Image (cartoon, helix red, strand yellow):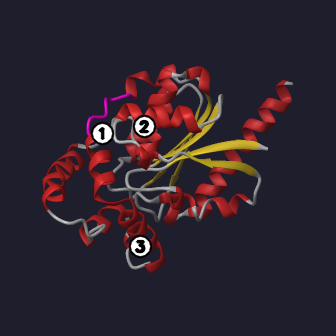
Amino acid sequence: MTRLDFIPGTLCDARMWSRVLPQLDGQYDCHHIPLYEASTRQQMHALIARHSAACAHLVGFSLGAYLAMEYALQNPERVQSLVLIANSARGLSAGEIQTRQRIIPMLERTPYMGISRIRLREILHPDHLDDADTVAIIQQMALDLGKDVLLAQFTASMERPDLMERLAEIRCPVLLIGAMQDQLVNPADLIEMQRNLPAAQLSLHEGSGHMLPLELAHAVSHDLHQFHMGLAATTMSAA
């Protein structure tokens, strides 16, 4: 059974994958990397190293996907494949950096009340903004992990070097999954990433915002399964 190591995004935990994993029908050995335990970038990479397989199939969402790319560049011998969801190799957009620079001082001086309605509009497709179950998962993760985790992750991940020109160094198979209506990640970046990666597939979806594993869990699980079925077939034919 193929082992998959899942890396969540900012202010997320294993619940980010709670709709994807059931649709994989127990065909994978799924493990979760507790990114929220880290307060620095170095600690985040150490958590990935500690909690992932020796030669890992990494599945990252948003910040987790960016960290997975960095990890693959630093430790190519430890990464067998990458699935990168809702993330650009260019790092954060100027607008997102400005948003975070505005939010951090507010967080430091006020109690944290969870994800604001304004922020939900930025990360969810309009069709899912009033989906009470989806919003509840996002809000509960935010409230459970809390202000200290959010501040640590915002601070540690604010500066994300542009990795676009280094993608050719990633030799393992890569699956890129994105949403056409993602307000945080430009789909054009994913197309450019596919061109720069030596062995990449790209799956772009309509009808989702940034929170793809919650908004379009069926599509994400299908993409993930098809990708790994292809890897298994390639391995068998080469044997």
| Magenta-span inclusion, residue 160 | yes
Say left or right for 95 vs 208.
Answer: left
Query: Residue 81 location, x and y as percent?
Result: 62, 33
Secondary element at tag 1:
helix
Q: Which residue is mark 1?
A: 156
Say left or right for 232 vs 97.
Answer: right
Q: Earlier in the sequence, mark 3 or mark 2?
A: 2
| Circle nearer the viewer, 3 or 2 | 2
CA gap, disc 3 and disc 2 = 26 Å
Q: Which residue is mark 2?
A: 44
CA gap, disc 2 and disc 1 = 9 Å
Say left or right for 134 vs 221.
Answer: left
Secondary element at tag 2:
helix
Out of 107 and 137, give the one closest to the viewer: 107
Q: Earlier in the sequence, mark 2 or mark 1?
A: 2
Cβ atoms at labels 2 and 1 below 8 Å apart: yes
CA gap, disc 3 and disc 1 = 25 Å
Amino acid identity at mark 3: Val
- Answer with the quarter of the image where residue 166 lies: top left
Query: Residue 208 location, x and y as percent?
Result: 45, 63
On the rendered image, what quadrant is the C terminus found in?
top right
Query: Residue 92 location, x and y as percent?
Result: 29, 42
| Circle nearer the viewer, 3 or 1 | 1
Q: Which residue is mark 3?
A: 135
In the image, the segment drawn in magenta is: 158-163
